[in-house]
Amino acid sequence: MADSDTYPLDRRDVAQALLEGRDGLVVVAGLGACAWDITAVGDHDLNFPLWGAMGGAASIGLGIALAQPDRRVLVLTGDGEMLMGLGSLATIALQKPENLAVVVLDNERYGETGMQQTHTAFGVDLPAAAAAVGILVTGTVRDQGELDTALPVIRETPGPVFYSIKVKAEELAFVLPSNDGVVLKERMRKAMLGGTG
Amino acid sequence: MSDWSEGVFETLISTGVRQAAYVPDMGLKKLIDLCIAHDAMTTIALTTEEEGMGVLGGAWMGGDRGVLLMQSSGVGNCINMLSLTQSCKFPLLMIVTMRGQYKEFNSWQMPMGQNAQEILKLAGVTARMIDEMDAVAPAVADAAEEVFAENACIAVMVHQKLMPVKTFGK
């Protein structure tokens, strides 16, 4: 099996591409590298970067998507985070939110704890699992060409959508968002609900 | 024996709760069925209770009030994810039906049932045990008001004596 050290896609470039021209897109980022990635692209009131709650990112995205059916919601998380909350994909499949996309930046490692290999390094296929529980649109991206094809699906296709984007295992500079959960919550709520927040 | 489910359901609707996330319990059967049958309520079957903290936190950011329906056996599943609720001060309304408490036929329910209230308190949840039928709906009404006005985290725990007794047919 290929070593993820040699994968061609860079996670920060992928995050940049996913968030390009984001408009009203809501972004929930799983703890660790994905939270730093979306912050590196640019902090935003509609960003909800997690500092904990491992396994919870997709569930948070589901709650937002159900409450705001006219707004696209992107959950961007890591393979370790997704593995800890795999059951939430089954919960999402039952609700079938058309406006929800869950994207795993899959470097096959636990990046915050010493780059230990995750289950995906040994062949666990997250999109196949997502498809098996009933997520309607799924796919795997391994290079720039596949990413170019996947981007409009992730941003616009009626879902729920689940993608694994294989990215290079690398340790990048920390770009840290606020870790004040109340601030992150209140700004998101205000950005979505306006004065009623 | 009269039932508390309808009163609780009417309370949830009148306080604006629109997402009901649940892991089932026999004691919650009627309440869950009422939620599923009502057009205004989005009912979300979870695979584990901890998903509820995420779903209902997201719901709140999107403008929806929610409730988590679960049995006491699921309290242990919630602990780490309650750090999300605490760190962000998300409002969280929980209705927890008790096992391992009264006429419990399954001894494996005892360890979590006996400790569920204390464990919730240790995790930062205000946990109120209700053991009178007529007090359940008012307790939920009071909790809902406090939860959504103050970003509080409150579990209304329904005593097992207010639930059907499971006997495994013996």
Image: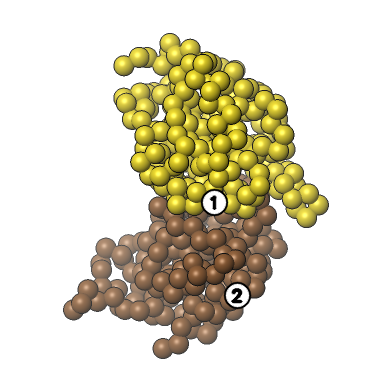
Chain hosting mark 1:
B
Q: Colour of chain B?
A: brown
* SS label for mark 1: helix
Mark 2 Cα shell of 10 Å, populated few (<14), some (14-19), many (≥20): some
Mark pair 2, 1: CA separation: 21 Å
Residue sitting at 57 percent across and 26 percent down?
A: A151
Examine the image and state in which quarter residue B166 appears: bottom left
Q: Could you say which chain is coloured yellow in the image?
A: A
Residue A14 percent across, percent down from the top left: 57, 21
Residue under label 2, please give it: B11
Amino acid on which disc 2 is placed:
Thr
Looking at the image, residue A177 lies above or below residue A160: above
Amino acid on which disc 1 is placed:
Val
Residue B160 percent across, percent down from the top left: 39, 75
Residue A44 percent across, percent down from the top left: 71, 33
Residue sitting at 71 percent across and 38 percent down?
A: A24
Residue sitting at 40 percent across and 52 percent down?
A: B47
Name the image quarter holding the N terminus of chain B: bottom left
Q: Residue A180, can we see it?
A: no
Mark 1 Cα shell of 10 Å, populated few (<14), some (14-19), many (≥20): many
Q: Nearer the viewer, residue A51 or A37?
A: A37
Q: Residue B100, can we see it?
A: yes
B42 lies left or right of B96: right
